[in-house]
Image (cartoon, rainbow, N blue to C red):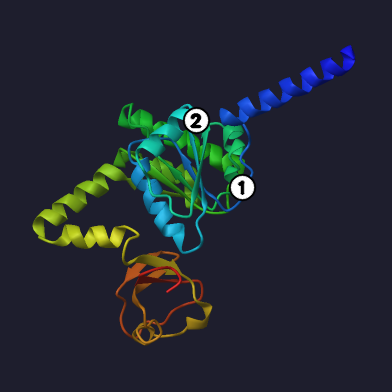
Amino acid sequence: MLIFAMMIGLITDSISDRLESLKEGKATVVESGHILILGWSDKIYRLLSELALAEESDGGNRIVILAEKPKQEMETLISEAQVELLKSNVIVREGTPSTVHNLNHVSAAEAKCVIVLSPSECSPDEADGWCLRVVLCLRKLGYKRGHAVVELRDIDNRELLMLAGGDLVEPIVAHDFIGRLIIQSGRQPGLAQVLESLLGFRGDEFYMKEWPELVNTTFSELMFRFPAAVPLGVMRDDGMLLNPDNDYRIQPGEKIIVLAADDDT
């Protein structure tokens, strides 16, 4: 009887420890094709909202957040912000994104895309250095499934990040980008409303996709092949070509840039 009671006690303790581990977010995220956000800033609430809108037509997705904050605190902040997640689910984990161990903890190698948020509590160079370490860990992990969008705070660090990340990364210098948008909006009244419509997932937005059946089609003919979308240009290996000549022919491997209401239009 004593042995039986000890076994029951051990099992109870084991279950309690397991439940506590799940509550604290220590369990490994076993996902594939998810969206991974590394880091935390005040931009995360709008980011979650836009990602949920983008994934709604596909039935939603799993959005995983790995940041140096307690799991329960992150869940509370997201709940208090009343983010509309629609059909998507958010999974949060506490940990340092600049270690391979923690990236494995959130199945980073299997993520559809990775978004690296710049920390706001340190200087621009320190924040960009942190982002660089995260990118190096992703490279070491062998992440090749998608691409990583990395927020930088100093445009002078862009080339260094591109050198370290190569084709894996797409750096965005938020302050520089937003500054240019503000200047252009100030010079063109009404442009802010146009940009808000185009850069969000409410209304029409930009999409890039390769259509092998349209190879050798002229750009003027594309207008009649997309009744519910507007072709704007092509993405080539050497960069983007907007508004090409009407007689420009689509080449193999090129992606067509369109403006459409949704990716299934």
Between 263 and 113, the residue placed more toward the observer is 263
- The relative height of residue 3 versus residue 209 in the rendered view (above or below) is above
Where residue 31 is drawn, which disc sits there? 1
Direction from residue 120 to residue 30 in the image, left or right: right
Q: Position of residue 216 (x, y in %)?
A: 46, 84
Q: Which part of the image, by quadrant, shows the N terminus?
A: top right
Where residue 231 is drawn, which disc sits there? none
Q: Which residue is mark 2?
A: 71
Is any atom of residue 171 visible in this view?
Answer: no
Instruction: Report if the CB atoms under discs 1 and 2 are less than 8 Å apart.
Output: no
Between 229 and 142, the residue placed more toward the observer is 229
**Type of residue at label 2?**
Lys
Quarter occupied by residue 18: top right
Mark 1 falls on what kind of element?
loop
Residue at 55% from the left image edge and 31% from the top image edge: 99
Residue at 49% from the left image edge and 76% from the top image edge: 211
- The relative height of residue 11 versus residue 142 in the rendered view (above or below) is above
Q: Position of residue 115 (x, y in %)?
A: 44, 45
